[in-house]
Amino acid sequence: MRLLLRLDPLPTDFESDTVELFGFQWVTETALVDSSDLLFGLLRQKISTLESLCQPLSFDFGQVSNIHTEADDIRNQCVRFLHYVRVFIYRFMDPPKQLDDISLHPYEELEAQLPSKIVEELQCLDLYIGHLQELPSCVLGSFTIQPSGKVLPASWHLLHLHLDIHWSILEILHILGDKMQGQIVYAHQFINLIGENLTNVSLLESHCENLICDLIGLAANRYTKVRPSEALNNHPYPCVCIKEMWVLIIQFLDHRSKGSSSECFWNILNKLLRSLLQETNSSEAHHICRVVQCKDTLGFSWWLISHLSSLYNFDRNGSQEEQTQVVSNWKFVEELLKKSSKPQNCLQEDQLRMHLHCCLSLCDIWEPHLPAVTILWEYYSKNLNSSFNISWLGVKSLASVSKTPYSMLEVVKCCCADEQTADLYKSDNSYLIFLRIMARLMKKARDSSGTHPWKQIKGRIYSKFHQKKMQELTEVGLQNFFTLFLLLATVAETEDVASRVSDLLHFLVPSHISTAQRNLVWRGNFAFLLVYVEKNLDISALVEKLAHGFRETAKEFLVSKSDYGQRNTLWTLLSTYVDGVQEVFETSPQLQLSEEKLLNDGFSMMLPACRESELSSVLNFLQTAVSRLRTINSRAAQGHWNAGSHLQPLTVMKERHLAVANALWRNFFPFLKSLRLSETPPFQLADTAAAYTLLALDMPSSAPSELQPQPVLSMMQLFGWDDMITPQFVSRYLSHLMPNRDLIEALSAIGYSSYQALTLRSWIRCVLQMFIDQPVGAIRTNSEQTSAPLEQLSEMTRLAFKLPEVENIFIKGQVEPKSYKQDPKGALLQFIKAAGVTYSGMQTLADKSSMVSKCLEYIGDILKYVKPYLTKKGPVEGLQLTYRTIGYLVRHWALILATSKAQQLLFRIIDCLLLPHALFQQDKGLPSALLSAIKESLQLFLQGLSVISCQSQSQGAYMKQQLKTIIQQYFGRFLPSAPSVSQTGNHPLVFAVCRDSQSPHIVHLRRTLMQVLSENYLQFKGPSPPPRLASMLSFILDVFQRSRIVDAGDVENLLPSVLKCLIFVNESQVRKFSTDILQHMVETYHRTTERDPALPMMTILRKFIEENSLIYDHQIYSILETLSILDQHLVINLIPTVTQSLKDSEHKRGLGRNASSREAYRRLLCQLGEHGQAELQNLDN
């Protein structure tokens, strides 16, 4: 602004001798003197013309462009004239002179009267255009039109011409005053006509005041549409021009106030707003009360000042400067604060929030002013129990008591933050905004003056709290109390504030306050602990009273187990303490501030009385505490420090960490140890035990004496390798520890090589007992099979396969392990197979002996692991898993079990799983679920036992007998009553003897099977056949068909019985099966035997013919006819035996020749070729 610097307003304009104004040429240096009346009259005429263009009576859209052009030209002419007036006064008006009595030239007289004339003309012009508020609504509505368009309505030009004129009047009067060198200019003609004084100064002041009133009125119109929640986001400027006008007025008035006695901008605005706040309707009221129509004048005043204060950031050129020293208006704001906090005004919470939000915005840009805090504190100290809610905001407005110490402190940190949230009106109540104001002003005062402002307001705050006041506080009041003092502890003297709070809380007698209030007091104390931790202050002074209260509450909790109402009340307090301690541990950067004093013996009293859900929360805390201690201790040992942290010497820090560790062991571990053998331990117990194991690894000296001298090993034996602990616990516990390389290295370093075998044994037990908790008869769904315990066991399986010994077994056995994400049951079978392959590939006796010992160590007392399944006869999945796994063990570890070291285990397997006592008790028998499991895995047992019976030298005979017994007991149990391909084909003995049928142990098994069948299932009692004969023959035929092998043992054991079936049984199925078996014996035996096939079969057939020809000669001839088709040579060799038997039978009868028998024999001989014909001739002779 050039006028403030007393520079030429327009140095490059009006340089020629003449000037064009309103379409006429005028002499530049004399026009205003000679024709001031005419020129100002033309100005008013142009304004009138522009006003007429705004009339909508005969509006034609086709004339819009022309109207815009004409209106723009009129405005430019008017503005040019006003520019000319300013330039003329600056350049051509002489300073006032002392006039002599001599006569003056007429022009000189006019020139001398010009200042007075200008004042009069400006007064007339001001009266002519009137107030901005008085403009028609169609003109004022042009504020919403953006000037970006090329064509604008005449109303827009008229509105902005009024703004130009109002500002030009101020500029002209200011330049005139400067030119007159402080001499007051009187409007003589006006005084003579009206009788009132009018000077350039009075006109400037009145016009400026009127203009500010108009601008306030425009702002009030916008305020009526502003919501309290959006007050700071909605400015009071209907357009940019109004904002610029405010900036110009501020710069103009503040500049004038520096060099004269005129008032500054804030004083004028304050005077107008005070008049507006008086709300009087008397005739003596200021005219602003008539101009401004606003119901909420107090809120409007806050809103207007908060926005206008930011305009001080603009300089004289209109550029924004953030670092500019802003002139404050605290004096008037104090008045507003008193009105806002005055109880008689009965302000609603939504209004109070808006007022304080505006005040907070002023605190950001003005210098600190602590009296504002004391004014507000007077109000809020009397209303601490208020919730400061806004009903229409719903749930968001409800006063919420902080649930944790950390959340309580977070509220305070938000109040201390320099940045404001965008939704502060809804997120913070008025009390929190007041605390923001306090924090902002105290921080700014501290930074600006160098001395802490705390001492200035300390007494005012402390004096409001006394015994009666503290006892009157409700839960919400206590929340507000803690929020206040936490903020003071954050920005002021922490220890002094904490000490004062401790003294004040003594006034609260626990028996006289509610549980919720006691809970809040504990959370508040922990919030102060967090402040101490953040400021690296030792917490021992604060902890003493809090820890004592916890100990007493825990003792009461222990003795009130049966009183559920009382224990629930006490648990609310105890859980607050546990959560608070956890937050302290999570926040403390180095655990060097006496945190161990929080872990007293109250925990050892509380834990035994905890229910499952309560215990889970404590165990979660314990895991956090131990993990935090391990992390910090490790970082300290490695020398990794946080930059800028206040660290104690390493030795002192180690002592502090050791103290924390000792407290953790002393107050928690005995209870954890007592829980390990629980039938249903909480799943977090495994996590916590693993954390303690790693703590023993990191800080072995902290472990109790009962775990020394090797605390890690003792912990592993207690929680990981003990067979009495539930498998779910063990799998979760070991899954935490198995990936830890430091733990593995530590176990290796102390020379304990069995840790891998013990860990693997635990894994095997966990897999075998994965169904141990399932009720017998329960049906498992897919979702249950993929539950968390199974996922945990799968993870343990993955880790077990990475153990060095396991990897070595797979490498030596040249077995490629499957994916680590496989089913644990399949993984166990895969491991058993790999171990068996590895053993079979060993050459030296020492290696084999070592492998046997290691394998037996791996499986441990495996029958003990599965005993619960056998005892309960279920569940089905458990029985199936048991028999399949141990069947796999017998099959693939047959060579291992054949050794003397494993002999005892083998005998127990046979006695417990295959030949239990119930098997031989006719009145009991075996349950269907058990039989089903045996059926699925019997082939594995038989194949393995066959290998053992062939390999074992000392127990070979015994094992062969046991093998026969097993076959004898289960063959009939799994044999269907009637022959069926689907049922006999699924008989476990079929699979046992038909898979890898050429191997020696399968051959041995098959011979044993056929021997058992011959001796126990195919014995005829005279001509009476055995039961289920057709099914047995169907089974034998199925074996022959699948294996395609018939050896001498099959013939020797089965042929006599098959021949009897053809003689004694007329059932079609039996005869068909017998014939098919006979055919397989002849064809397959002949094909697969190198020696003369007739020798064994001839012997059996001769004996059969000799024994049965007397009675069953016709059946024998029929059998021989069938045989002649299959093997004629075999029957030819039998001719002498048949002929002799025929003659012997005739002799025994004593009736001479038997014609029917001879006829049947002749038919047989006719089919035997030359040998038959020769025998026919001999027979007839």
Image (tube, helix red, strand yellow):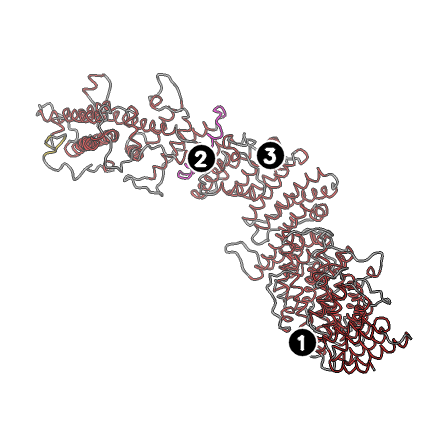
Q: In the drawing, does residue 613 fall left or right of residue 322?
A: right
* Quadrant containing the N terminus in the rendered view: top left
Which label sits in the foreground, 1 or 2? 1
- Using the image, determine if residue 940 lies above or below residue 70: below
Label 2's element? helix
Pick whichever of labels 1 and 2 is earlier in the sequence: 2
Camera-side residue: 464 or 681?
681
In this figure, which residue is indicated by the disc labeled 2? Answer: 357
Evaluate if marks 1 and 3 touch, with contact meaning CB atoms under 8 Å apart: no
Disc 1 and disc 3: Cα gap in Å?
A: 78 Å
Amino acid bearing label 2: His
Amino acid bearing label 3: Glu
Camera-side residue: 965 or 1025?
1025
In magenta, the rendered stretch is 343-371
Q: Residue 841 shows which numbered tag?
A: 1
Q: Mark 1: give few (<14), some (14-19) or many (20+) Cα within 10 Å.
A: few
Q: In the drawing, does residue 56 fall left or right of residue 675?
A: left
Disc 1 and disc 2: Cα gap in Å?
A: 85 Å
Is the magenta region chiefly helix, strand or loop? helix
In this figure, which residue is indicated by the disc labeled 3? Answer: 475
